[in-house]
Image: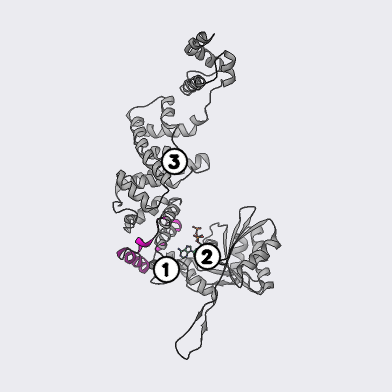
Amino acid sequence: KLRRKQVKGLMRERIPREILEVLKTVGLTAQEAGYKVYLVGGSVRDLFLRSPNLDLDLVVEGNGMDLAKKLARRLGKVRVRTHKKFQTAKLIFDDGLIIDVATARMEYYKSPAALPVIELSSLKMDLYRRDFTINTLAVSLNPKDFGLILDFFDGLRDLKGKVIRVLHNLSFVEDPTRVFRAVRFEQRFNFRIGKFTEGLIKNALKIDAFKLLTGDRLFHELENMLLEEKATDCMRRLGELNLLEVYHPKLKLSDKLEAILDSVEQVMAWYKLSFLTLPTRPWLVYFLALADPLDEAEMEQLCARLALAPRLRREIKEMRAQTLKVLNRLQRNQLSPSKVYDLLHKLKPAYQLYIMAKARQEWAKKAVSRYLGNMTKVKPLLTGDDLAGMGFDPGPLFKEILERVLAARLDGEVTTKEDELALVKSEFGSYLEKTV
Ligand code: ATP
């Protein structure tokens, strides 16, 4: 049994002081308004897993929107967005902290015949609608019982046992996206999907519960998995559970697929470490790898099932053809830096990374990493002004000259500005004579 004192200690240790102060203010404000308020969901789970999480979810027994507005007034430096239909609100702080406020709905259960109407704790009802036991923990924030943990569904037992477990048999039928969430949490935390829960996943697959899922939601959960550090493990696990075929019947786990996904993971880790950021659409690199076994028509079907935007679909189609061409060229023989630049500079980073992941020879991989690491920063020393000063007419010729100078610089043919001037004079001097 967890003591309130232990939970408070954990909160003091794991939650930054300013945020803890905010949580105390939340409790106090609720108390004054006659509400009860709880911290719930992912942030409580992550508190016990000792993993940082700044997305705080609150459930209010009372009026959530009212509490959010009162808090915004009291705390300052925060924007509130309310959603009347769902009785929810979002508090967005200047420093990036986000607090979601939900209202626990009171639900009354009419029991048969003469028995009285029973009222379940609305917090418990709210938590019962959630996906997994580990996400149902709640910590009370009202001053009287601040730090008291409420564990209606044995979430603490499953956190300790590292198990992902649903709350009831119909969970995946009710919402099949939970299947992907189960895999994502399992891989992220190195947990295991419980035996019975795994059986329910197989059942959902058998009755094809996924066919009712919109492409949007299917894509969103795929994207979430592909944004995980262990994206490849998520895909491997989907394959094991025969869940890849939900996206497309041709998608199956194979050594080849695992190899390319592993390679993407390495490339993504390298990119993140080198540039301290991710390319735009980071999921796309994995997505291209995942779709490697599909031909063009099958890829179209996959994109359609995921309801990708038409523009993105067109881009992917074009780029898949182009990346293959570039890859072939890159792998045939070692190219000069300027040739590598030529091949890569018109592609977006996601496609460059896909090429890097797919390249079999180490030197071909290196060529791409060198491009991303150094070449994009290289610029000629000569400027348009210099060219005009030399007597060239501004226009398309400028571009051509500067591209030639850049190529020479990439290949080490020139180092100083004088070198560049000499090169321009010797290769483009004839244009000057014509215009003079
Ligand atoms: P992450 O670290 O990925 O953000 P999280 O648990 O905070 O994980 P959210 O997707 O932000 O995840 O969800 C917040 C809470 O809402 C979860 O803790 C979960 O209990 C609940 N939830 C989210 N999606 C579902 C769903 N499809 N079915 C039931 N409950 C859900």
Q: Which residue appears at 50% of the width and 70% of the height? A: 127
Report the front residue among 195 and 242: 242
Q: Is mark 2 within 8 Å of ligand 1?
A: yes
Question: Image quadrant of residue 112?
Answer: bottom left
Asked if marks 2 and 1 touch (Cβ < 8 Å), the reply is: no
Q: In x, y percent, where is residue 414?
A: 50, 18
Residues at marks 2 and 1, CA–CA distance in whole angstroms:
14 Å
- Determine which residue is flagged by label 1: 166
Asked if marks 3 and 1 touch (Cβ < 8 Å), the reply is: no
Count of numbered circles in the view: 3
Residues at marks 2 and 3, CA–CA distance in whole angstroms:
33 Å
First in sequence: mark 2 or mark 3? 2
- Determine which residue is flagged by label 2: 41
Q: In x, y percent, where is residue 55?
A: 56, 58
Q: Which residue appears at 65% of the width and 70% of the height? A: 30
Q: Amino acid at mark 3?
A: Ala
Q: Main secondary structure of the magenta part?
A: helix
- Apparent side of residue 55 relative to residue 199 in the rendered image (left or right): right
- The stretch in magenta equals 187-215
Report the front residue among 310 and 33: 310
